[in-house]
Amino acid sequence: MAASPFSDLIELPKEMPAMLKGVVERDFELLTECEFKNSSPLFNEMFKLNESKNFDPAWFRQRITKVRADSRATTDAEFGRGLRLKVFPRTCGGETKPDTLTLGPFYFAGTQPERIATLIHEARHADGCSHSKFPENFTCLDDLPVPSKEACDSTSDGQCDDTYKGANGAHMIFLVNFARNCVGDKQEIEKLKFKAFGILRQILNVNDRKKLAEDLFSAEELERFKKNHNSPLLLFGQIESKTVGKDQICAPK
């Protein structure tokens, strides 16, 4: 059996149970085994595939230098330590600065597709993609999930992005495309798409939120998800919008 292209990156604690180590190893194996034969335009824009339509390990390796685990971590996973900024607005891009990815206890609570999407989410932070907290006097009009203080400020560093190119967008794009191409059970595909739909409320720019929705979901799926989502944090078209230049955005007044 060929060695995983990520074997040299993974440095898990010796005291870590073998079962959990096996989970991490299998996650990375599936990341490169999945064939993305039917990938969306935003997926093709953000990620690299090889000739066989498999995920190119180079994309991840350019961003993550080591994968470690820490039982004291309070999140499912985190990129680096203390590197996320709390500034709005926050651009995404520029020089890539690779660093360590640390897995926390909550990482193992998710399904395999969710865990793999978490790896992609954290790797995207290396591209200068930090999260934002909720801006003051934030207003927006949209028929998609609207960002809220609860959605953005659930951690001390903030959880929202002002662009679809950020870690949340990468998470959504990868999760939905992985579900389409690499998950056989229809109910599981529906659950994964529904979870990705909920992440829309962590994208601050209304145009980028719509871009993600159009790329990842059919019109019928959007209507079904909006009707079925019972979270009180999701608001649809209930607050005012603001237009700046050519782009309609969600922004402080």
Image: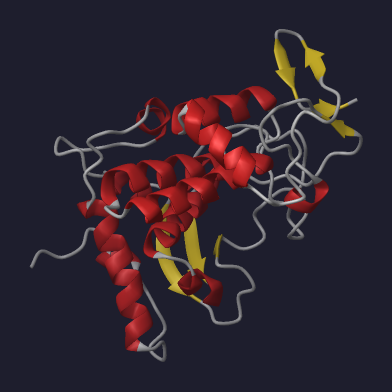
Residue at 42% over, 84% down: 13
Q: Which quarter of the rendered picture does the N terminus lie within? A: bottom left
- When asked about the image quadrant of residue 185, the answer is bottom left
Q: Report whether residue 93 is seen.
A: no
Q: Which quarter of the rendered picture does the C terminus lie within? A: top right
Query: What colour scheme was applied to this rendering of the protein?
Result: secondary structure
The number of numbered discs placed on residues in the rendered structure image is 0
Residue 84 percent across, percent down from the top left: 67, 52
Residue at 27% over, 50% down: 182
- When asked about the image quadrant of residue 180, the answer is top left
Between residues 125 and 179, which one lies in front from this camera angle?
179
Residue 71 percent across, percent down from the top left: 55, 82
Up-down relation of residue 236 to residue 181 (above or below): above
Up-down relation of residue 150 to residue 6 (above or below): above
Q: Report whether residue 246 is seen.
A: yes
| In the image: residue 139, left or right of residue 166 | right
Q: Residue furthest top?
A: 246
Residue at 14% over, 39% down: 52
Residue at 48% over, 62% down: 100
Between residues 140 and 83, which one lies in front from this camera angle?
140
Q: Residue furthest bottom?
A: 15
Up-down relation of residue 103 to residue 134 (above or below): below
Up-down relation of residue 228 to residue 23 (above or below): above
| In the image: residue 115, left or right of residue 128 | left
| In the image: residue 124, left or right of residue 2 | right
Residue 43 percent across, percent down from the top left: 39, 33
Residue 232 percent across, percent down from the top left: 77, 50
